[in-house]
Amino acid sequence: MEIPKELDPPARLLMGPGPSDVPPRVLRALAAPTVGHLDPYYLEVMNGTRRLLQHVFRTTNELTMPVSATGMAGMETCIVNLVEPGDEVLIGVNGVFGGRMCDVAERAGAVVHRVEAEWGRVFSPDELRAALDRHPKVRLVGIVHAETSTGAHQPLEEIGALVRSRDALLLVDCVTSLGGAPVEIDAWHVDAAYSGTQKCLSCPPGLSPVTFGPRALARMDARKTKAQSWYLDLAMIRSYWGAERAYHHTAPVNMTYALYEALRMVVEEGLDARFERHRRHHRALRAGLEALGLSYVPERSLPMLNAVRIPDGVDDKAVRGALLREHGIEIGGGLGPFAGRAWRIGLMGASCTRRHVSALLAALGGQLGGAGDALAAADATYGRG
Amino acid sequence: MEIPKELDPPARLLMGPGPSDVPPRVLRALAAPTVGHLDPYYLEVMNGTRRLLQHVFRTTNELTMPVSATGMAGMETCIVNLVEPGDEVLIGVNGVFGGRMCDVAERAGAVVHRVEAEWGRVFSPDELRAALDRHPKVRLVGIVHAETSTGAHQPLEEIGALVRSRDALLLVDCVTSLGGAPVEIDAWHVDAAYSGTQKCLSCPPGLSPVTFGPRALARMDARKTKAQSWYLDLAMIRSYWGAERAYHHTAPVNMTYALYEALRMVVEEGLDARFERHRRHHRALRAGLEALGLSYVPERSLPMLNAVRIPDGVDDKAVRGALLREHGIEIGGGLGPFAGRAWRIGLMGASCTRRHVSALLAALGGQLGGAGDALAAADATYGRG
């Protein structure tokens, strides 16, 4: 056969909904020599990764680890291990990812009750309280902390306390928020959560950090049926991450190296400093985007994901194509009802710098007109910051 | 928190059941700059990866791609997409991985008929024919081409023709054989197969190449139920790999780079040359191991996985520990009934060289006594080769 040509990926600024730019340190770690998945050295890296993830998730949960697949597999891991056929679950749907949680739960045999909100809006504790009152047998509540399809930032403090007061577990999607905004697993009474590596942790895609608290473990221990997925069955995976080190599957060794290094960088920067960095650049980007006449989709925006409406008469694909081709900048299109109607601009991890903000505003302003004003608005915000 | 120390993996010769040594070219590809999973450049890499995998699987199957998780997820992908609850399946069990196939199929709601053989033995076409006669409603036959727990090498030519003559699909596990011994998807009438990256392809673990033929696609198209796994649902994944490029999950971009490069190296070497290399070093290793008094577990050994009985009185863990600590050589222990009773010595991909054979025989001979004779036997075999 004709051998396909040598790899030569173009340089990009990754400012979509993930993946984000990966720092050279993390790429170097990714390419460190592979060792066996039961090598004593790798077991040390696993232990270090768990400690780092516990720190970033703000939890003491012993069962904290990366699932050996991407973020959606983290969602599925949580659901297939915490839900048994016939269990009633309540899921908040205000975007694509809440909808997916319903799909995954239905495939696991759950009876799914949806509580819906307009895309871009978040849920109030009262809405969830009323839904739980309507469905008192609900055993698990699923909610998205950072809805990547709309940029909506769901507050969880009161919802965590509410769900804890019922006989239900709280499952949280923090794929896009972890490492870029506060995620307080223990303080917010979150029983299980999943995330991704390719957003604010700035590691390549491929793993899904998850964490399970004592109530989630008790639920798993009381299961009457096996998890329907062998690959994601925590009853076995726990033995590999635990003292037994029982072989389950061949772990993605190099991806774990990369996550370990990415987490070290998060901890070196400090969580508070990192969150402040995300807020600061978000404020400047927002000022610039609003100066371009763009309005935000969500009422309460995530700092790391800026979903804005595409102005009437502007060609979505032409603009994104020009950004990519002429500036090497990737931004995201809309999903579902927002396809062709919204852009999703990420400021995640290593992609959250003043250089990214300026480059994006210059390029997008060049397409839409008004680059100078947008940059001035951003600069003024930095000056005040 | 105290930040865990910098990554510094030890140099190993990986001669267990996988992962195998990863060539510097592949590690370099792994660390190439991340681009988005819908970037036109990444779509090109996906297309190239498919062409390369088609070549290595020896198939024209359009649905040929890596699943975004390790080899066991490839097994699960095949089963959850090809089996519906209540379907009868027949699975050959002569080691750990046949047993796992049963477990995965049961979780998918299949009625599982096992045909069993002693560990280390392979199945004759007559045994499978008799089993199919006993269970005429079987819709899928699962069999392991390269049983990594025993080193047994299952011939498939006649079995493929047999299964094709019934109304059943043939599913083949070629995790350990692909790229190291002939795997003829089309010529052998294999309807679906899964493999891993970390064996004879010498790519880090993390992806599972799969391929599906027209009869498998027809089975999927005729499903009455959704696949129970969202993450592994080919009805959606096909749209991402097909012309629609519909977003399903964030693909593991850098792992795809590494697989692409590893496959390029396979094609550059040439499949026939690569298979001959595996046979040549296997013959030499075998001569050396037998000179050490070790006997092979399987009646028909794979070239890339050499399972030998541990002599009475020899301490499995002490020997493997000394090889790792003092020589940096990893070999595998036994699984299931072979735990403590067999070693599994891999000669896979980049770990299949004369240097590996000599280093292993020198080190193991040093532990057991007889290194000189073992090396002489290997050298004599090379001389004849």
Image: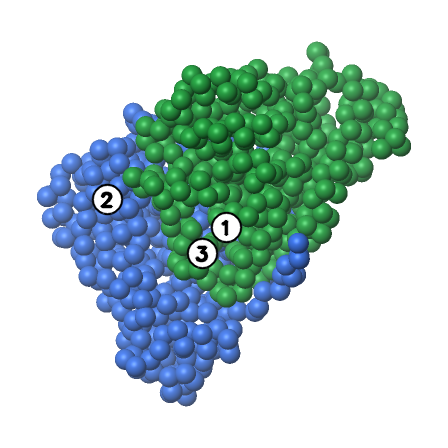
Chain colours: A blue, B green
Disc 3 on helix, strand or loop? Answer: loop
Q: Nearer the viewer, mark 1 or mark 2?
A: 1
Q: Chain of mark 2?
A: A
- Identify residue for label 2: A141
Disc 1 on helix, strand or loop? Answer: loop
Judge by depth and name the residue closer to the eye, A356 or A186. A356
Residue B342, position in %: x, y?
65, 20
Labels 1 and 2 share a subunit: no
Labels 3 and 1 share a subunit: yes
Q: Is residue B247 visible?
A: yes
**Residue A383 picture quarter:** bottom left
Q: CA distance from mark 3 to mark 1?
A: 9 Å
Kind of residue at disc 3? Gly
> From what the image shows, is residue B173 above or below residue B314?
below
Kind of residue at disc 2? Val
- Identify residue for label 3: B242
User: Quick one: quadrant of the C terminus of chain B?
Assistant: top right
Kind of residue at disc 1? Glu
Residue name at image x 67 percent, y 36 percent? B181
Residue ranking furthest to the front: B165
